[in-house]
Image: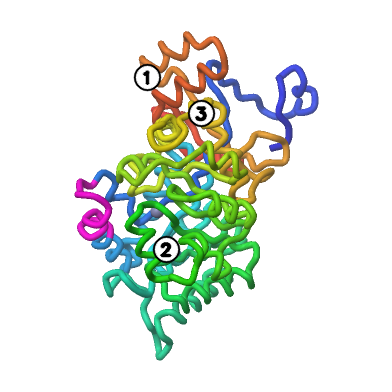
Amino acid sequence: MHAVGSWQALHGRFADLPVVHWPQHLIAPGFVDLHSHYPQTDIIGSPAEGLLPWLENYTFPEEKRFAAPDYCAQAATFFIAECQRNGITTALTFATTHPASVQAIFGAAQDAGLRLISGLCLMDRNAPAELLNQPHGGVDATEQSLLHSEALIARWHGTGRLGYAITPRFAPTCSEAQLRGAGELAARHPTVWIQSHVAENRLEIQWARALFPASGSYLGTYADFGLLRRRAVYAHCIHFDDADRALMQRSGAAAAVCPSSNLFLGSGFFDYARADAAGLRYGLANDVGGGTSFSPFHTMLAAYYVAREGQGKTGMSLSPQHLWWQHTAGAAAALGLDGVVGNLLPGCEADFVLLNPQATPLLARKTARADSLDELLFAMIVLGDDRLVEQTFVAGAAGKAPPG
Ligand SMILES: [Zn+2]
């Protein structure tokens, strides 16, 4: 991005450039999404009696298919295209325990020019045997998972717009040795990201506490193994106490708030008031496939519902601008990528979306009545979906083609 301003202010400086005119449209930063599982794209909207049957009947069988590189490649290509159709231009996403799943998502993102962060899922216990990290050539599964991670860092981290994330699935599916090794890897590679889950639901917390009784809390387990630092992003962060929030704030780690997933699975409600009081870093995430949509508009609306809930915590109405910030500049800052993406300021990468507020009859009727920026943004948050995103530009190039 070289300059931002009115035609009158800028046209003299760029007189030799061709001009594109988009009347009645809006240009906004590309959306930054802090948490998803690309291998779960096809299990969005799977009916189940809660989290455990959902994992057993849908998630685990689907993730097993990622042992086949061809299966990974077609899923990765679809996921990247779906991000672009919805205006997501930076994504932090899980792969599976299969190294081919990581190669596939980085390859597809590279082809599309998308900024993407991913990593090999670390999971050496407490899941179906086929889904665990596998031993290889006399090296045990735990050690092999760390060797694979290090090789994938060397291959992909900092290649073009790609970044690597050390990815323990969550503490209950990782042995102490694996968490310790992941922490050592994170210390050796300070610019690499870390992604995992924490405090999504109460049974999970009890399980984590039973497996790591020496830690002060579930979040504290990650801190004990060196996995809480800047560039660490933890999905959910719902059932925290103030000590957890203070620990997270001090460490520089950030929360990926996953509102559509939390509502779908009945996990609970992220406490915005206490997060803000603690100075916590956070941003929004679709958490596909526990989440119900790729659309940043659906995610922002779900965040509004979650914040509004006031039975078990302080309810509040998040402003449209704050909701939008959580999915752009706020999410970028959570990743340590402020000044790089999530903003239209000069110096940022030219990731942006072209929005058409007349995309549907109801949107056209409603946005025509907007008397302020807040009213216009909120109409789009409540009524918008992929139809609102007419084009997505990554690094200045049009990705999603205009309709027709
Ligand atoms: Zn997740």
- Earlier residue among tags 1 and 2: 2
Position of residue 391 measured from the top left corner of the image (x, y, whole percent): 49, 32
The colour style of the image is rainbow
Give the amino acid at mark 2.
Phe
Marks 1 and 3: which is nearer the front? Answer: 3
Find residue 16 and report its image quarter.
Answer: top right
Disc 2 designates what residue? 170
Q: Which class describes the residues within 10 Å of circle 2: few (<14), some (14-19), or many (20+)? A: many
Q: Is residue 149 visible?
A: yes
Q: Quadrant of the C terminus?
A: top left
- Earlier residue among tags 1 and 3: 3
Residue 318, numbered label: 3
Q: Is residue 112 left or right of residue 133?
A: right
Give the amino acid at mark 3.
Leu
Residue 360, numbered label: 1
Element at label 3: loop
Between the residue at mark 3 and the residue at mark 2, the CA separation in whole angstroms equals 30 Å
Residue 235, numbered label: none
Position of residue 308 measured from the top left corner of the image (x, y, whole percent): 43, 29
Between the residue at mark 1 and the residue at mark 2, the CA separation in whole angstroms equals 41 Å
Magenta region? 46-59
Marks 1 and 2: which is nearer the front? Answer: 2
Q: Give yes or no for residue 397 being in the magenta stretch.
A: no
Q: Is residue 112 visible?
A: no
Give the amino acid at mark 1.
Thr
Dominant SS type (magenta): helix
Position of residue 213 measured from the top left corner of the image (x, y, whole percent): 44, 70
In depth, the one of 143 and 302 nearer the eye is 302
In depth, the one of 137 and 370 nearer the eye is 370
